[in-house]
Amino acid sequence: MSEIPQGFEFDVIIVGGGHAGCEAALASSRLGARTLLTSLNLENIATMPCNPAIGGPAKSNLVREVDAIGGEMGLAADATYLQMKMLNRSKGPAVRALRAQSDKKEYMKYMRNVLEKQENLFLKQCSAVDLIVRDNKICGVIDELGHKYLAGAVVLTTGTSLSGKIFIGLQSFPAGRLGEMPAIGLSGALEREGITVKKLKTGTPARVDSRTVDYSKTTIQPGDEELNFFSFEPDRPIREQIPCYLTRTTRQTHEIILANLDRSPLYSGLIQGIGPRYCPSIEDKVVRFSERESHHIFIEPEGRDTYETYIQGFSTSLPADVQLKMLRSLPGLENVWIVKPAYAVEYDYVPAVQLSHSLMTKQIEGLFCAGQINGTSGYEEAAAQGLIAGINAARLVERKSMITLSRSSSYIGTLIDDLVTKDIEEPYRMLTSRSEYRLVLRQDNADERLTPLGYRIGLISKERWARFKDKQRTIKKEITRLHKTRVSPDEEINGTLARYNEEIKMNYSLAELIKRPGLNYEAVKKIDKTAQNADFPREIREQVEVQLKYSGYIERQNAQIDQAGKLEKIKIPEDIDYQGIIQLSQESRDRLSKIRPVNLAQASRIGGVNPADISILLVILESKRRMLVRTSDYNKMS
Ligand SMILES: Cc1cc2nc3c(=O)[nH]c(=O)nc-3n(C[C@H](O)[C@H](O)[C@H](O)COP(=O)(O)OP(=O)(O)OC[C@H]3O[C@@H](n4cnc5c(N)ncnc54)[C@H](O)[C@@H]3O)c2cc1C
């Protein structure tokens, strides 16, 4: 164990032990900062209050990126899965997505164990109720017993707990999650320091007893036979997989919902916070898509040693008696027993336009926010932000420069840029469509994109770095070999190619053949007579194939990135007075003054700032730059 703290002084304090808090605490302590992690209930570290699953479209990219930089989520998901599934397998690599059904309790135990064993990290169960701020700099937090904890950086990762209020039908009570108290005090402290706090809402379905489900009326959803993992680390555990099941809503379900809408806190106006558009409640789905006769409902296990089962797609805030009727109208659930009711929660968040790309607040130096508090929803989004905030908090106290990720480098960069640039008014979820560079930001190449950063800042070990370099060398060598190896048409080769409805009439390189729609690396291997065609691990074979097959698209996207990079390079001075630029529309002046973009590319992404405004800014920045050059030339001469 690290040296026991004598007082209450730390380098970094993390408030909240959810997915953002865990990554932030691990990153900060692994980078050498003495870190305190406080949470309302240490038994609930890294809990999944909603779906017991990690990954899925775009979210799997985030998990792989977290892993590539040296975070923990991928390792935790690999160690505790009940089932692994590669979604969109038949589609292009940009949208393929790994999803793990997780053992919720095991996941929490795994993370708690990692946190406890981590050097430089101390855990404390308490509620941070106030902030200590001096001269716009954070100095620490105060807990509910009045204890002061001092630090040069504080990361708030309070999830849905800030002034949380749960709704079940028309009943409501203060709580951050079912069975956990809300965090009271911090919202007021933030507002006192000039930080705006607003409300959002989210909801979760009921948990039922699996012994009361008749699975013979449902469709089994097994995991993949050929396993994939999140972490780029080798030797991931092979575990027995547990299936999920599929059922559906019926006409009766829809009738029950429609007949009880007046008992919904959402429809009766009791909840004011806006909910997640991409994860709507079942009543929202039935009302908004009234033409649909049925919706898919997945029955997902929560663990190996529990009967508690999650009903995915059935989130609701209708009263408990209505929930029971609704559930019992689903095929297979006619006699179901509810273990925990569905509920909605309304909570305070800090609109992230008040943060810079490092996730530090612009208002208070050293105060960072990450996860659901920034208006996002989802474990993966939280973990990704936690990692960046934890890294930057540790770097701040060491007086090192902040790490920021560009949109073209990662989904993490895209997520953070969206949060700090766009005024988000509903829970933000990562989607592949949010990235303009999704062909190059694939889950399969997250290590290539981000492990060099992880190594440079000190989160990737020397051994892992050596393995990474070796992998990249092998991929490059094999691609070069496939370009160089040429085949000529003959009976044997065309006989093999005919099996794939392909044929050659002249010489081709193997690389050219892989690009053909009917062929892939495995198929080309059958006509590759060179001895070097060793049996590479699947991750290498996949990389070689993706890089060759999609090389045209990837090159085009890289050119697009270079083009966009030109605007990124035009920095905007921090002290620019937008209100004084009368050529800009008033809306642009207001939006730019509020968000204060760091460069012209970010300015161009702000809603309400149109291309004409960007041209005006470009001219003004250019003339300012020229004036500066002229002044410095004059100074040099005189
Ligand atoms: C009811 C519900 C439904 C959800 N539905 C969805 C969904 O449909 N889709 C989806 O993607 N995500 C959903 N989520 C969100 C998902 O759970 C979160 O996005 C994710 O867990 C956020 O991670 P986090 O680390 O930001 O916060 P959390 O995981 O919520 O962790 C916050 C932690 O901070 C602690 N804490 C809070 N305040 C204090 C304080 N003042 N002092 C000390 N500790 C404090 C809490 O105890 C908790 O441990 C839902 C969450 C809930 C509760």
Image: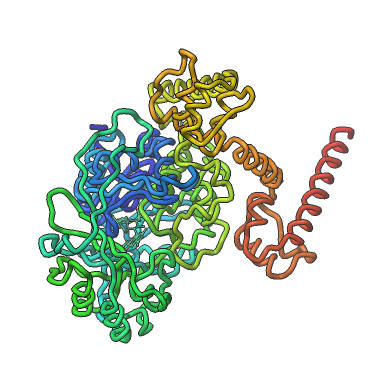
Location of residue 339 in the rendering, given as x and y in whole percent from the top left corner: 15, 66
Judge from the rendering whether residue 486 lies leftward or rightward of residue 332; answer left or right.
right
Rendered position, 386 above or below 49: above
**Picture quadrant where residue 440 is located:** top right
- Could one spot residue 497 in this view of the protein? yes
Location of residue 141 in the rendering, given as x and y in whole percent from the top left corner: 35, 54
Q: In the picture, which quadrant includes the N terminus?
A: top left
Rendered position, 152 above or below 473: below
Residue at x 59% of width, y 23% of height: 509
Rendered position, 213 above or below 74: below
- Indicate how the structure is coloured in the image: rainbow
Q: In the picture, which quadrant includes the C terminus?
A: top right
Foreground residue among 386 and 28: 386
Residue at x 27% of width, y 46% of height: 223
Farthest top residue in view: 531
Location of residue 408 in the rendering, given as x and y in whole percent from the top left corner: 58, 43
